[in-house]
Amino acid sequence: PRETVFHRAFDLAQSPETLLEQLIDLGTTRVLTSGGQQTALAGAHMLARLRRLAQRRMEILPGAGVTPENILHLIHATGCEQVHGSFRQRQQDPAGFVTDETYWVTDSACVAAASRALDQLSGDLADPPDGESDA
C-alpha cells in the first residue's frame, strides 16, 4: 500500500519501455527520470513518450536540470504534472571556516521563482504533440 519511487538508475536502461512495464508490474508508483539524457529538458521527448506509455498506471517524474527558467517548457513538452528539482545555488561557507570551496544549498529565491513560474499554468495539460505513435 506504500508509494515507491524508482530513481534515476532508470536512465541507464537499454530499454526504458520494457523497464517501465516491469516497474509497473512490480507496483512502483513513480519513476524519477531525465528521459535518459543529461537533463530532463534534453530528454523531454522520451519523458512524454514514457508518460503516455504509463497510461496513468505510474507517474513519470522529470528531474535533472529543472530550473525556474525551463520548468514551464518542460511541463508543456512532457505533459507531466510534477517535476523534481533541487533549485540550488553554490554558496561559500558563511562562517568562513572553508574559504576556498563552495557547496550546494537550496536557494529560497530559486524556489520562489519556480513557484511563480508554476502559478502561470492554467487548465489541464494536454498530450504534447510529437507525431509519434506509441502503439
Image (cartoon, grey):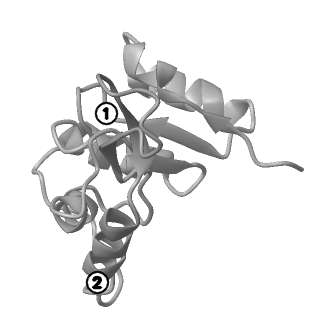
Image height of 22 relative to 68, above or below:
above
Image height of 8 relative to 76, above or below:
above
| Image coords of residue 29 (percent x, y) | 67, 46
Q: Quadrant of residue 101?
A: top left
Left or right side of 5 for 64 = left
Q: Which mark is residue 35?
A: 1
Q: Residue at x 24, y 35 (%)?
A: 39
| 112 or 31: nearer the viewer | 112
Looking at the rendered structure, the kind of residue marked 2 is Leu
Q: Residue at x 36, y 75 (%)?
A: 112
- Marks 2/1: CA distance? 22 Å
Disc 1 is placed on an element classified as loop
| Image coords of residue 82 (percent x, y) | 45, 62
The residue under label 2 is 121
Q: Residue at x 33, y 28 (%)?
A: 99
| Image coords of residue 42 (percent x, y) | 15, 37
Disc 2 is placed on an element classified as loop
Count the numbered circles shown: 2
> Which quadrant of the figure contains the C terminus?
top left
Label 1 crowd bin: few (<14), some (14–19), many (20+), radius 10 Å: many
Q: Residue furthest front?
A: 96
Q: Is residue 62 visible?
A: no
| 43 or 107: nearer the viewer | 107
Q: Quadrant of residue 56?
A: bottom right
| 66 or 16: nearer the viewer | 66
Q: Is residue 20 visible?
A: yes
